[in-house]
Image (spheres, rainbow, N blue to C red):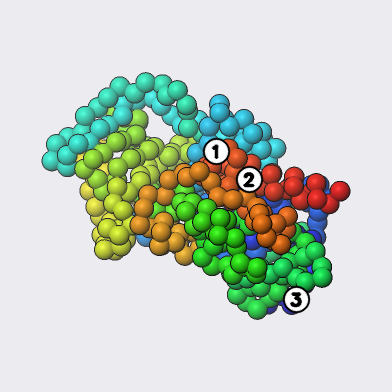
């Protein structure tokens, strides 16, 4: 436990927006800061297969080094999101466009073969980071390695202090932090549910926070890895639309080097339906679907993974699990009508002025929070 301490800025949440805010604050001369992260690792909604147990379907996976595949946020669209392209260039990470060569598959029944459709070049090409978004997280971690970082530490209360223009952040570990500014880089619903505010959040602010779905919080991803992207040899794109399930949408996530083949899919089953089955049962169903779509070569992946974001207590609430976590109108960025106004700002992606819920939104929300803190310091 870190003893009571005083900093200029406390950042609650060590995902993309929190880490990027820390980097930008340090670049602009604000070095007295702390990052408070409830999870044992930094990253937030960025998670890779290299970070979790593989549950290999084949013993081969135990002895080979597999590429890292994204289980959380992965895509960006530089044609429309020029800012994120610039940020990735500044960070020195390599990006590449998803392949669109080959036919896409449409599956309408588990009892009939899928239909092949000639894929047209998409109007908006999906781009990814070589090495996965965890590579971006690791790069940002190196950039802010001088900052104080508290892991496995959840913020539990934020209180305005009388007589000084500061707030106190109480943590689950017993640590207390006094700060001039707090940046909330966590989902709005999580902030409303897990942090006690004094004075209490105005009803208008609490209402927008509680009604803002957390993007991806209701969903689960399945990733399977093969020795080669064998479907490409047969002129298949690796993109699938299915009404048969259990996966409704599948994409080829083979990396730029193509040393292994990777496929990922979104579950059609909602959180309640997924909760009735074990991960192994869900994986067997997914492998069966892969065989229906891509043939017997898909029967035994080197490894496969499931990440169900609805089960993550620091990402999803019960409200997220009940409904599709889509993009809403956006929560209140500041706590207007309270003594916390000007001291506490929400910089999660859902609070971004643009691209809410997307990776680009996380960077833009962080930049807005940093800019306002720097203005307040002048």
User: Under tag 3, what secondary structure?
Assistant: loop
Q: Which residue in the protein does label 1 denote?
A: 355
Please report the residue visible at 72 percent of the width from the left and 58 percent of the height from the top.
Answer: 343
In the image, farthest residue toward the right: 378
Q: Nearer the viewer, residue 282 or 36?
A: 36
Could you tell me how far apart the alpha carbons at marks 1 and 3 are, in whole angstroms?
A: 37 Å
Indicate which disc, 3 or 2, sits on the residue closer to the N terminus.
3
- Image x and y of residue 303, in percent: 37, 53
State whether residue 313 is above or below residue 64.
below
Residue 151 seen in the current view: no
Looking at the image, residue 5 sits to the left or right of residue 303; the answer is right
Q: For the point 80% across and 50% down, which residue is it?
A: 376
Q: CA distance from mark 2 to mark 1?
A: 10 Å
At which x and y percent is residue 117?
27, 24
Q: Position of residue 2 (x, y in %)?
A: 71, 75
Q: Quadrant of residue 171?
A: bottom right
Mark 3 nearby-residue class (10 Å; few <14, some 14–19, many ≥20): few
x and y percentages locating residue 190 in the rendered image: 52, 61
Q: Quadrant of the N terminus?
A: bottom right
Q: Compared to 1, does 107 lie above or below?
A: above
Task: Using the image as rendered, state which of residue 344 and residue 35 is in the foreground.
Answer: 344
Residue 198 visible in image: yes
State which tag comes first along the sequence, 2 or 1: 1
Residue that carries the numbered disc 2 in the rendered image: 365
| Disc 3/disc 2 C-alpha distance (Å) | 29 Å
* Residue indicated by mark 3: 4
Instruction: Count the marks.
Output: 3
């Amino acid at each position: 436990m870190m003893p009571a301490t005083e900093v200029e800025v406390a950042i609650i949440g060590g995902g993309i927006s929190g880490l990027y805010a820390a980097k930008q604050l340090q670049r602009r001369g604000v070095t007295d800061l702390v990052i408070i992260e409830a999870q044992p690792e930094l990253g937030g909604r960025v998670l890779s297969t290299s970070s979790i147990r593989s549950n290999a379907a084949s013993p081969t996976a135990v002895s080979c080094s597999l590429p890292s595949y994204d289980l959380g946020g992965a895509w960006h669209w530089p044609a429309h999101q020029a800012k994120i392209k610039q940020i990735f260039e500044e960070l020195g990470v390599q990006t590449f466009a998803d392949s669109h060569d080959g036919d896409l598959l449409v599956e309408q029944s588990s009892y009939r073969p899928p239909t092949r459709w000639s894929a047209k070049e998409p109007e908006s090409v999906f781009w990814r980071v070589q090495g996965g978004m965890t590579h971006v997280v690791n790069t940002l971690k190196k950039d802010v390695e001088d900052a104080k970082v508290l892991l496995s530490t959840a913020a539990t209360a934020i209180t305005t202090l009388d007589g000084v223009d500061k707030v106190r952040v109480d943590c689950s570990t017993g640590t207390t932090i006094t700060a001039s500014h707090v940046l909330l880089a966590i989902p709005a619903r999580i902030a409303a549910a897990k942090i006690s505010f004094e004075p209490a959040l105005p009803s208008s602010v609490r209402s927008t926070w509680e009604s803002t779905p957390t993007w991806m919080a209701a969903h689960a991803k399945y990733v399977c890895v093969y020795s080669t992207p064998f479907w490409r040899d047969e002129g298949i794109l690796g993109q699938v639309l299915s009404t048969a399930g259990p996966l409704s949408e599948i994409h080829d996530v083979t990396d730029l080097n193509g040393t292994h083949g990777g496929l990922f899919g979104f579950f059609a089953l909602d959180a309640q339906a997924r909760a009735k089955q074990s991960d192994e049962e869900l994986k067997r169903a997914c492998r069966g679907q892969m065989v229906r779509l891509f043939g017997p070569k898909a029967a035994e992946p080197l490894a496969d993974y499931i990440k169900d974001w609805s089960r993550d207590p620091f990402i999803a609430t019960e409200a997220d699990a009940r409904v599709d976590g889509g993009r809403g109108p956006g929560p209140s960025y500041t706590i207007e009508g309270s003594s916390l106004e000007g001291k506490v700002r929400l910089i999660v992606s859902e609070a971004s002025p643009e691209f809410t819920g997307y990776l680009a939104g996380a960077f833009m929300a962080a930049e807005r929070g940093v800019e306002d803190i720097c203005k307040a310091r002048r």
